[in-house]
Image: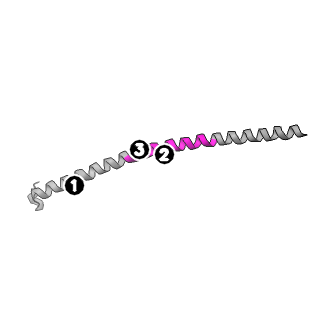
Amino acid sequence: MTPEMFNLSWWEVITVAALAGMVWNELRAIRKDLARLEAKQDKYNHLQERVARVEDSCASAHHRITEAHYANKN
């Protein structure tokens, strides 16, 4: 198949090919950005889990301290 079958000039074919290449590169960049953002989100989620565990531990410790404090007053 030649470009003449579609009534296209060589410049139009080259332009379409160049535009397709630019779109392909942009898609690759978007995929790379998504992968980077997913990694950051995973790191953030892991940090949130750690913070929740520390908060639970702290609440538990405060509860024990309060119980010990009021147990000594009786």
Q: Give residue 28's position: percent from left, percent from top.
A: 31, 47
Taking the image as shown, residue 51 lies to the left or right of residue 42, namely right
Q: CA distance from mark 1 to mark 3?
A: 26 Å
Label 3 Cα crowd, 10 Å radius (few <14 / some 14-19 / many 20+): few
Three-letter code, disc 2: Gln
Tell me the residue at 46%/44% (across/down).
Answer: 40
Taking the image as shown, residue 22 lies to the left or right of residue 43, namely left
Residue, disc 1: 19
Res 36 label: 3
Which of the two marks, 1 or 3, is nearer to us in this view?
A: 3
- Circle 2: element type: helix
Q: Main secondary structure of the magenta part?
A: helix
N-term-proximal mark, 2 vs 1: 1
- Which range of residues does the magenta coloring cover? 33-52
User: Quarter-wise, where is residue 46 in the image?
Assistant: top right
Tell me the residue at 71%/42% (across/down).
Answer: 59
Residue, disc 2: 41
N-term-proximal mark, 2 vs 3: 3
- Circle 3: element type: helix
User: Quarter-wise, where is residue 6 in the image?
Assistant: bottom left
Label 1 Cα crowd, 10 Å radius (few <14 / some 14-19 / many 20+): few
